Image: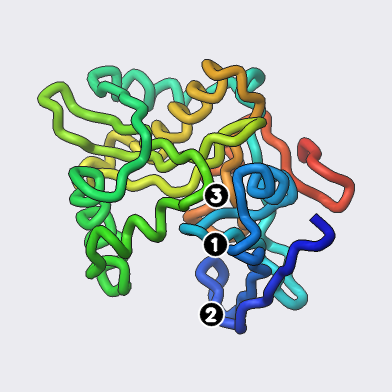
Amino acid sequence: MSALKLYHTPPQPCGYLAGRAARNLVADPSALDASLYQRLISRGFRRSGDYVYRPACSGCRACVPLRVPAARFRPDRSMRRTRRRNEDLRLTVTPARGSGEPYDLFRRYLQARHAGGEMARSGNEELSSFLLSSWCQTLFLELRLQNGELVAVAVTDRLADGLSAVYTFFAPELPERSLGTLAVLEQIALARSLDLPWLYLGYWVEGCRKMSYKCRFRPHQVLTDEGWREPG
């Protein structure tokens, strides 16, 4: 990986911590394949479409890569309640696709959660370019009601040593189901069933409410200068 070209993005407002500027280190898209992507993920990178990046902010290291060991994970009481609350849902795991029902749900989710954002007005081509890539195996973990209605999709990359949670979206009118938490539980269960050791959950950011849920999945490891370690 020493010959891989990496590029810095220009500074922009941080999406996690107010009043801070953010920059990313982006891997040369023309060099990427599934094997290199695996190595980058294990070094704290993430994927957005065909771009693989890692935060590289001046004077800030708040974004901490976090992964869950699938075989050793134990749900807490709240997670067990979430499981029971959603026993009526049906899970299917399908190859990711660039159109159809998931994108109708994705737009509903964006309009409810990010109504002022550019993506909320995007078509299927723009949305799929954010979720999918041309060089890795991506799955849709789809959760449906008994009547067949799609209520959640966990976009998940399959790696040699685990799964990587790319993005999850769900029916915004069903907050009582905790579908975001359920999606992570299903990804951990899938990793375990495939004998894959890790679920990579992306970045945990202390002080950022929308990222705080990740540290609830225990045990977990965070990436430090000495490698992956369990906190404490």
| Labels 2 and 1: the sequence-earlier one | 2
Q: Where residue 165 appears, x then y in whole percent?
A: 51, 42
Asked whether 134 or 149 is in front, the reply is 134
Q: Where residue 168 appears, x then y in whole percent?
A: 39, 45
Residue plotted at (19% across, 51% down) = 104
The image quarter containing residue 84 is: top left
Q: Secondary structure at mark 2?
A: strand
Q: Secondary structure at mark 3?
A: helix
Q: Is residue 172 visible?
A: no
The answer to whether residue 68 is above or below residue 12 is above
Residue corresponding to mark 3? 212
Residue plotted at (20% across, 36% down) = 150
Q: Which mark is residue 51?
A: 1
| Labels 1 and 3: the sequence-earlier one | 1
Q: Where residue 124 appears, x then y in whole percent?
A: 25, 58
Residue mark closest to the camera, 3 vs 2:
2
Residue corresponding to mark 2? 13
Q: Where residue 214 appears, x then y in whole percent?
A: 56, 43
Where's the N terminus, which quadrant? bottom right
Residue mark closest to the camera, 2 vs 1:
1
* Number of residues whose C-alpha sits closer than 10 Å to that of mark 2, classed few (under 14), some (14–19) or many (20 or more): few
Distance of mark 1 from mark 3, alpha carbons?
25 Å
Q: Is residue 205 visible?
A: yes
Residue plotted at (19% across, 43% down) = 101
The answer to whether residue 53 is above or below residue 155 is below
Distance of mark 3 from mark 2, alpha carbons?
20 Å
